[in-house]
Amino acid sequence: MADEVVLLDFWPSMFGMRVRIALAEKGIKYQYKEEDLRHKSELLLKMNPVHKQIPLLIHNGKPVCESLIIVQYIDEVWNHKSPLLPSDPYQRAHARFWADFVDRKVYGVGRKLWATKGEEQEAAKKEFLEIYKTLESELGEKPYFGGETFGFVDLSFVTFYSWFYVYENFGKFSMEAEFPQIVAWVKRCMQKESIANTLPDQKKIYEFVLKLKKIFGLE
C-alpha cells in the first residue's frame, strides 16, 4: 500500500518551507493543502487540536506537528536517501542544538524588525545582528553547518532566506555586507533544486508583509 502523505501549510511560512524541502530531498509525493490562517480548516483543527498551527504532516491518517519534529520524522521514516541528521550521536545532538537555536532566536527577532518601530525596532536590530553573527561564527569556513554536506541545521535555517529582503528593508542594513559567509552559504544551498524550487520570491514575501502590517495596523 502506497503512503498517503498530506501537508497542511501556508506559503510564506519558513517553518512550512522546511517540511517541503525535506519531502523534496527524499523524493516523497504528497498532497499540498494551503491553509487560510484566519479561517483554519476543520482538518487542521481536528488533527492539531493543541496548537492549531501549520505546518502539519498527515501520514497515513496520523498527524505529526511542529516543523523540526516533522523533518526528523521524515528523515527517520524515509531513510533510503538524503539523510538530514548525522548518524553519529554527538553530531546529531549538536545539529539539534543549532536547529533549536534557530527556532528559539531567529524567527522572533526577525518579526520584531518589521512589526515594531523606534527604540523597540533598534533593539531588535541589535539583537538580530548578534544572533546572525553567532550563526555565522558556527558556520565558519565550512560549506554547510554540518560540514561537507547539506543537513538538518542548513534546512532549519535556509528557509529564512526568503525573508532577507524584508529584514533588510525594515532594518536598514545589507545582509551581504553584515554576513558575507551566511550569504555565500545561502547561495550554495540555493543550487539545490529542493531549495530553489521551494523558497518563494523575496519581493513576494515583502508584499505579503506590507499587507500584514496594514491588517494589524502596524504601518
Image (spheres, rainbow, N blue to C red):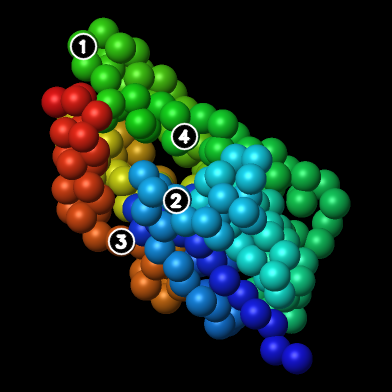
**Badge 2 element:** loop
Relative vertical location of residue 136 with respect to residue 14 in this rendering, above or below: above
The residue under label 4 is 106
The residue under label 2 is 40
Q: Residue at x 27, y 20 (%)?
A: 116
Residue type, mark 3 in image? Pro
Residue in the foreground of this view, choosing between 46 and 200: 46
2 or 1: mark nearer the eye = 2
Relative vertical location of residue 159 with respect to residue 22 in this rendering, above or below: above
Q: Residues within 10 Å of mark 2 (few under 14, many from 20)?
A: few
Q: Residues within 10 Å of mark 4 (few under 14, many from 20)?
A: some
4 or 3: mark nearer the eye = 3
3 or 2: mark nearer the eye = 2
Residue type, mark 1 in image? Gly
Residue in the foreground of this view, choosing between 174 and 14: 14
Relative vertical location of residue 66 with respect to residue 72 in this rendering, above or below: above
Q: Residues within 10 Å of mark 1 (few under 14, many from 20)?
A: few
Residue 186 position within the rendered picture, expressed as x and y whole percent measured from the top left: 39, 55
- The mark found on residue 200 in the picture is 3
Residue 144 position within the rendered picture, expressed as x and y whole percent measured from the top left: 54, 56
- Residue 130 appears in view: yes
First reached walking from the N terminus: tag 2 or tag 1: 2
How far is mark 3 from mark 2, CA to CA?
A: 22 Å
**Badge 1 element:** helix
Q: Quadrant of residue 198?
A: bottom left
First reached walking from the N terminus: tag 2 or tag 4: 2
Residue type, mark 4 in image? Val
Residue 98 position within the rendered picture, expressed as x and y whole percent measured from the top left: 63, 40
- The mark found on residue 118 in the picture is 1
Q: Residue at x 42, y 76 (%)?
A: 193
- Residue 159 appears in view: no
